[in-house]
Amino acid sequence: MERIKTLEMRGVTRRFGTATALHSFNLTMEGGMFVSLLGPSGCGKSTALNCLAGLLDLSEGQILVNGKPVQNVPAEKRGFGMVFQNYALFPHLNVSRNVAYGMEIRGVPKADRERRTQKALDLVHLSEFGKRFPAQLSGGQQQRLALARTIVLEPAMLLLDEPLSNLDTKLRNEMRVEIKRLHEELNLTTLYVTHDQSEAMSMSDLVLVMRLGRIEQLGTPQDIYNAPRSLYVADFMGYVNKVEVDVAGRDGEEWIVQLPGQAGATLRAKTTLNEAAWQIGDRVLACSRPDETLIDPLPTSNHLRGTVKLVEYMGKSFEGLIQLEGTQQQVMAHSQQPLENGQRVELGIRPERLLLFPMDAIAGAGKPGMAAGSAAAEPALKGQAG
């Protein structure tokens, strides 16, 4: 197949009756990139993938490969390889026949089929399992077989739709490494659909966080993790501590906020995410991740006081639900030392890890101070996707 130099999805829209599942989806990616579509169920990520694969017709828009439109090209002629969530293996064919079947249909000579089948099985570490049937394989082995069956056809692009969702945590971690290894070893262009932020962060060159059929934010994994542009993205990236605070002023690049009901609890947030014209006394949301809201070791600034209400042992650390002093608000915080219910503690958050969002962003995101689902006003998007 022709190698992909550039792939563009321009204004791709997909409607099902009166419902629009994908709204004017735009994406530009270069050959060899690993791009992930990240979001909860129903956000439109699989719809976008299926439109690209040719499994769904477009209601509007264009798909261009190396500058040539392919939206009217049948799926089987686009040269893309797809790995499904349920693997779709042939139960009556052994491992080698599963891998070779696509080449048989395409009329590849037997000698080439055998060579390419063996090479694909070697790549996914299944060379000793050629005579077994899918039912005789573990979940991770079945996933690797599904990958081998796809890459043996030497696709121009690899499309993966939630391929690890049926695996346990250990196998998911192993398969993440395998997929990334294959991507780099074969110099594949890959589009990956997932609801798991750790998968998207660990494997991708570029991440698109999706919401309600639209791209909420596009960026590198570091951009998405460190600088979410909306409360929706922040919540999805684990910023589940949401505390109402009052604006007390600004000092250079840092906002200064205070926790109502706790005297002396002044916090600094070194963030330029929201350049709104906040005034002294305005109420905003201060958001942080539990693993960056620390009791021990205690950061040098941004201290709050509270009482431990619930403790979970996390293996290398402890996580506590903390009732903040003088308020009904609660946060999750980490500690290297054991915690006990009823214990009074001090916790802190580094200013650069405390994000501020306007109060109206919490609409639909649950109550402040607790982990919740999220929604936010959809920002104007810059760059190559929108």
Image: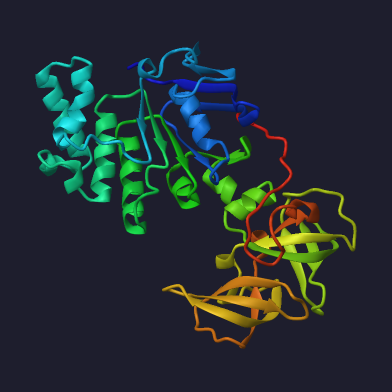
Which residue is nearer to you in this view: 294 or 367?
367
Which residue is nearer to you in this view: 257 or 70?
70
Quadrant placement of the N terminus: top left
Task: Answer whether residue 227 is visible to the viewer in this image.
Answer: no
Please report the residue visible at 54 percent of the width from the left and 26 percent of the height from the top. 28
Where is residue 239 shown, x and y percent of the image?
62, 59
Q: Is residue 108 left or right of residue 160?
A: left
Please report the residue visible at 16 percent of the width from the left and 47 percent of the height from the top. 136
Quadrant placement of the C terminus: top right
Q: Is residue 112 left or right of residue 238?
A: left
Where is residue 13 shown, x and y percent of the image?
60, 24
314 to 344, vertically: above or below: above
Q: How is the image coloured?
A: rainbow
Please report the residue visible at 26 percent of the width from the left and 24 percent of the height from the top. 153
Where is residue 355 shown, x and y percent of the image?
69, 57
Q: Is residue 307 left or right of residue 275?
A: left
221 to 251, vertically: above or below: above
Task: Answer whether residue 27 is visible to the viewer in this image.
Answer: yes
Please report the residue visible at 53 percent of the width from the left and 45 percent of the height from the top. 41
Where is residue 139 shown, x and y percent of the image?
27, 49
Place residue 125 in its image quadrant. Answer: top left
Which residue is nearer to you in this view: 308 or 165?
165
337 to 111, vertically: above or below: below
Place residue 280 in its image quadrant. Answer: bottom right
